[in-house]
Image (tube, helix red, strand yellow):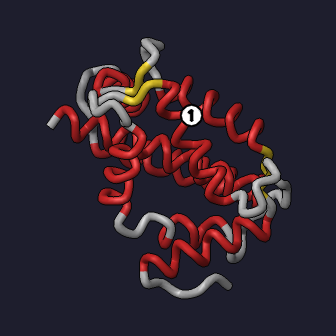
Amino acid sequence: MKKTLILALAATSLTAGGIAYAQEAQRGGDVTRSAAETRAATQFARMDANSDGVINTADREARMRARFDAQDADGNGQLSFEEMQASREARGEAREERRAERGTEGRGGHRMGRRGMRGGGEMRGMMMQRADTDGDGAISQAEFTAAALTRFDRMDADSDGTVTAEERQAQRGERRGRRGGQPAE
């Protein structure tokens, strides 16, 4: 059970790295290998809640506790219906603000949230197992960065150290093909 939680947590963080590439693509920018490595380090630092150098169950529990505490407006250790509703509304408003900032009102960001995570639990688990190369149930910064750079290198078709919009589109089509989905648009 603990290992499953750790793997799910790490998979979520690895998935977020893919989302970061998508955000860069929405801005129309190319992504360099150096930028991908920097982004991975930033993401790892955010996910490693207790700063012990690994992403594990303790980090997941700390984030869950912080999320609960933020929702528990009156601090009584229980979430009322009103507190849950207020939290849901605040998340929705924050999501809409992010979309407005990115300019993804139309076809972009919203659709991605629904289609992008099909089979998400299984996929995240597989991603985590691949990232946890020593099999200890925790993801070190080196493992996390290596997994992010492996994904980057897979997208960098011409191996020039930069992932372009065209390379992202080609990779997207390839992934869809492997999953039996629609070809890239």
Task: Residue at 31%, 21% (x, y): give it.
Answer: 58
Label 1: few (<14), some (14–19) or many (≥20) C-alpha neighbours in 10 Å: many
Q: Position of residue 110 (x, y in %)?
A: 60, 68
Q: Quadrant of residue 158?
A: bottom right
Please tell me which residue is depicted at 41% across the width and 21% down the height of the picture. Answer: 54
In depth, the one of 28 and 80 nearer the eye is: 28
| Callout 1: SS | helix
Above or below — where is 12 with respect to 23? above
Q: Toward which corner of the image does residue 148 lie, by quadrant? A: top right
Left or right of 114 in this view: 130 = left
The amino acid type found where label 1 is placed reads Thr
55 versus 96 height, above or below: above
Image quadrant occupied by the C terminus: bottom right
Q: Is residue 111 left or right of residue 137?
A: right
Res 46 seen here: yes
Left or right: where 57 falls relative to 42: left
Identity of the residue drawn at 46% across and 16% down: 53
Quarter in which the N terminus is drawn: top left
Rendered location of residue 20, percent (x, y): 65, 48
- Front-most of 102 and 132? 132
Between residues 11 and 161, which one lies in front from this camera angle?
161
Q: Indicate left or right for 31 with 168 as reference.
A: right
Query: Which residue is painted at 29% across and 45% down in the image?
Result: 81
Residue 27 locus on image (x, y percent): 82, 57
Q: Residue furthest left?
A: 1
Q: Name the residue tied to disc 1.
A: 145
The tally of labels here is 1
